Image (cartoon, rainbow, N blue to C red):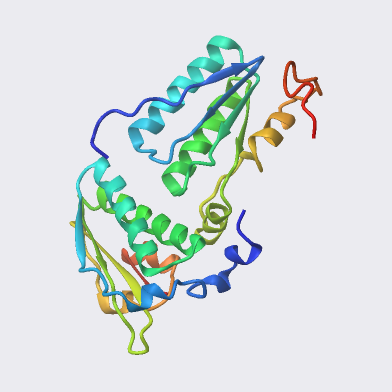
Amino acid sequence: MTGQPQPGVPILRLGDVLVTGLLNELDDRTAIAFTEELTERISAEGARGVLIDISRLEVIDSFVARTLMELTTVARLLGARVIVAGMRPPVAITLVELGIELVGVETALNPEQGMAALGWRQAPQPLEGARRGTSR
Amino acid sequence: MAPPGEYTLASRGAKRPARAENRRPPAPATYPVRTEEDLLTVRHAVRAATVEVGFGLVDQTRVVTAASELARNAYVHGRGGTVTLEYPREPGGRRGLRLVVKDEGPGIADLDAALTDGFTTGGAWATGSVALVG
């Protein structure tokens, strides 16, 4: 890294759910800033759920795990349910082998399943103007 | 999606590309652990080293995670230090990766006993070193 401040990951709001993610380069400052921004958004927007995509995380060490646990606990105290989605299989294996705990952190295989757990349903809709009239 | 076998313990070394056997191992490299940014640098270097040696994805993740823990430990509790990457070679030709994490803390009573082959988890935390042979 060049030491430049990293751009924050955007936090999107979909109804009463906040959707965001973590970059692979998670250092202490980024983690703290992320937790602060997310909790502020939960409070300000009355979010009931938070989906955090972690598919970019190539490593979850005890620091990152602790960040996720604290974030989940703080969000819960604010009335929001956090789901962490998209953990890489090697990361899951390593967490178990090294005894790094993610106590109380709900997970989902991917963001889609995470959103479903937070109450979102995909409604089938016709795609407007998409491939209309194309023949096989 | 990788095949199921990619994520088993037995994959260690099995999927090592043949080319890794024939190349000259890189020279040992030492990285300082003084700042938060150094931790990222160390992670990148260790990741690159595991790729160089030919570890599979799971082993890469194991080693980088362990290195991250140790480097952070040196940074937070050991008043800073260094991480050295070495590329030992067994007589049979098997290539390995050795991480030596040193800090400015109280020290280790018996370093030789701490440096044993194989992936150790409990030992890794206690001794500040982890050796891997792939």
* A85 left or right of B31 in image: right
* Quadrant of the snapshot with the C terminus of chain B: bottom left
In this view, B38 is above or below B111: above
Residue at the bottom extreme, as displayed: B91
In this view, A106 is above or below A122: below
Q: Quadrant of residue B119?
A: bottom left
For this rendering, which residue is in front, B58 or B109? B58
* A2 left or right of A25 in image: left
Residue at image position (41%, 61%) is: B63
Q: Quadrant of residue A128?
A: top right
Residue A134, given in percent of the width and then of the height, sits at 77, 26
In this view, B27 is above or below A40: below
For this rendering, which residue is in front, B43 or B131? B43
Residue B47, given in percent of the width and then of the height, sits at 37, 56
Residue B18, given in percent of the width and then of the height, sits at 43, 76
Residue at the top extreme, as displayed: A44
For this rendering, which residue is in front, B38 or A129? A129
Residue at image position (30%, 74%) is: B23
Residue B115, given in percent of the width and then of the height, sits at 31, 75
* A40 left or right of B83 in image: right
Residue at the front extreme, as displayed: A135
Residue B68 in view of the camera? yes
> In the rendered picture of this protein, how many numbered marks are placed on residues?
0
In this view, B78 is above or below B86: above
Residue B133 in view of the camera? no
